[in-house]
Amino acid sequence: MTNQQIRLAKRPSGMLADDDFALTEEAVPALSDGQFLIQNEFVSLDPAMRGWMNEGTTYIRGVELGAVMRAFAVGKVIQSNHPDFTIGQYVSGLTGVQTHAVSNGAGIEKIRSQDVPPSWYLGVLGMPGMTAYFGLLDKGALQDGETVFVSGAAGMIGTLVGQIAKIKGCRVVGSAGSDEKCAYLVNEIGFDAAINYNTESLPDALKTHCPTGIDVFFDNVGGPTLDAGLANLARGARVVICGAISQYNASDMYGPKNYMKIVSARGSMTGIIVFDFLAEYPEAVRQLSEWLKAGKIKYREHVETGIERFPHVLRMLYTGENFGKLVLKL
Amino acid sequence: MTNQQIRLAKRPSGMLADDDFALTEEAVPALSDGQFLIQNEFVSLDPAMRGWMNEGTTYIRGVELGAVMRAFAVGKVIQSNHPDFTIGQYVSGLTGVQTHAVSNGAGIEKIRSQDVPPSWYLGVLGMPGMTAYFGLLDKGALQDGETVFVSGAAGMIGTLVGQIAKIKGCRVVGSAGSDEKCAYLVNEIGFDAAINYNTESLPDALKTHCPTGIDVFFDNVGGPTLDAGLANLARGARVVICGAISQYNASDMYGPKNYMKIVSARGSMTGIIVFDFLAEYPEAVRQLSEWLKAGKIKYREHVETGIERFPHVLRMLYTGENFGKLVLKL
């Protein structure tokens, strides 16, 4: 049996390139006692991956050169010498961009529910879902009826943040990069307003759509988008930094010129690192599943196919070409 | 009797210029019932003044063109039709850059203690002292034994922040712009280390002097100094933005490129607006007075003389020429 793998070949500078990765093949090794073999079916593409390609440690170590690219994946157990993992069991974990992964069970979650497709455990019931949930409700300390602005609103995390905020009775405004995405946010997802940052002045439009200011600003984008949100904070605003997707491939980082607005608004800026909430995942999965079942949360996947297309598909995240949670089917 | 006044003549762009202000004279008006006349003796020069010269409202309204420049001052009551303010009483308040001010008592504090010179109520026992006290202890939530980095450390607020942190048993590191100021901070004020940002690499020196990272970063400076501090945060760090003196006269604001370090450090950024703590001033004045009396806090004034020199003296703040709390003797 052959394991196809995407390995980190080079550290990218600026926008990642196809040859930053290499597709390699190796034989799947025989299992030792206590091990099992996962056949990965879906790999998750997440904005944080660009940071993982850099050298050094931020909140997590960078991927080593030559190593299999780190990724969340879901797959099925197809061989097992482990008493707790039986053949046919669906599992998720950081098993990497590869068709097969040998595991001893550490860091592997069993997917017990059959209510949703297994790939949803890479999205709404996985890391992005947990990020939206804890970022908004814990770090953002969202109160019923507040005004929420989420940037990168049509992305996986953005649509969830918006829907959770709507469930909490909030006014929800988002920014996205196309009229199609904005229409989707308002007409299908239930946002109160969506701003196309490519055709509208974001600072002006925020003033219009958030007349009492932004109480919780959930930022996935960074750059001038972050500045536009900062310029429209309400008193006591909480700015939750989730990501800076506009900046991950920039060679010169853009710092928010309006950071002093946090001071005059008597606000705060914090960030969400989802791994800090591991112990509380089950409660969030239960709540999100309930909302999904009740039709209060809609979820959209964008599926691409073929492990060899990984570099191209990952790049789609940063150029905004995907529409819905981006996963790669192996 | 003639009142000499400094009025805002123009909105500055970039570094303020002499002709942004005009010196005017007018007769002191006769007092109505319930009014008293203050002869100002000292005017405070504070970094926030540059922001007050801009149009529009941030945390406080900008000074109107043609109006007397806003400033804290201390002076003596020399005429009175007010039952609570008797001749000879020293008072402080936002009475502006002028030799005489007519007041009905609103916003005026009586200086009751004779233990310290009245001008100290513009510094250690005035707005800067309150800013240091509440910024460090309330917004910074300082814990005994933590590592504190204060930028602009040789300034009025910086020296106080450092000394309060030392009283709390903390490791205190500061940055300043000359070897003389750094020697003063270490040898006379009791800082554990002081870094001359003009001759040393601030990010590298912070790594050396804060080996476990910065727990509370009290920033008066902004710009690359803010970035250097952000690059060295400890887990759970609190960044308290007090000012951005390096940026007030800049035409293009420098945003902190390292703001994502707040996320990876699981930290927070907030700001201190001292007016929010008005109700708690008496407690802080009592505590600071006690520390002054016990010799635990040293205080240094830099006195310049002559109302006509106000523009030049104010500019000294932003070029770092002052050494100690800058006041203008009228």
Image: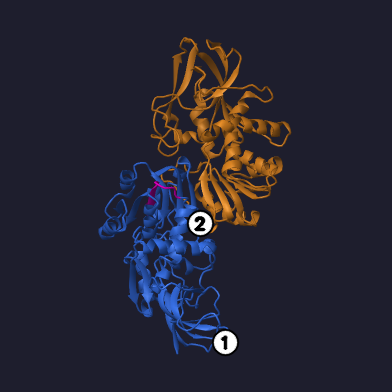
Chain colours: A blue, B orange
Structural crowding at the residue carrying mark 1, measured as other residues with C-alpha within 10 Å and reported as few (<14), some (14–19) or many (≥20): few
Q: Is residue B317 left or right of residue A122?
A: right
Kindly identify which residue carries mark 2.
Answer: B263
Q: Which mark is residue A64?
A: none
* Type of the residue with mark 2: Val
- Closer to viewer: mark 2 or mark 1: 1
* Type of the residue with mark 1: Ser
Q: Is residue B118 visible?
A: yes
Q: Is residue A321 left or right of residue B196?
A: left
User: Where residue A86 sits in the image (x, y, percent)?
Assistant: 50, 82
User: Where residue A294 sits in the image (x, y, percent)?
Assistant: 36, 61
Kindly identify which residue carries mark 1.
Answer: A32
Are callouts 2 and 1 both on one chain? no
Chain assignment, label 2: B
Looking at the image, residue B141 lies above or below residue A68? above
Q: How far is mark 2 from mark 1, CA to CA?
A: 40 Å
Looking at the image, residue A258 lies above or below residue A120? above
Q: Which residues are magenta?
A: A142-150
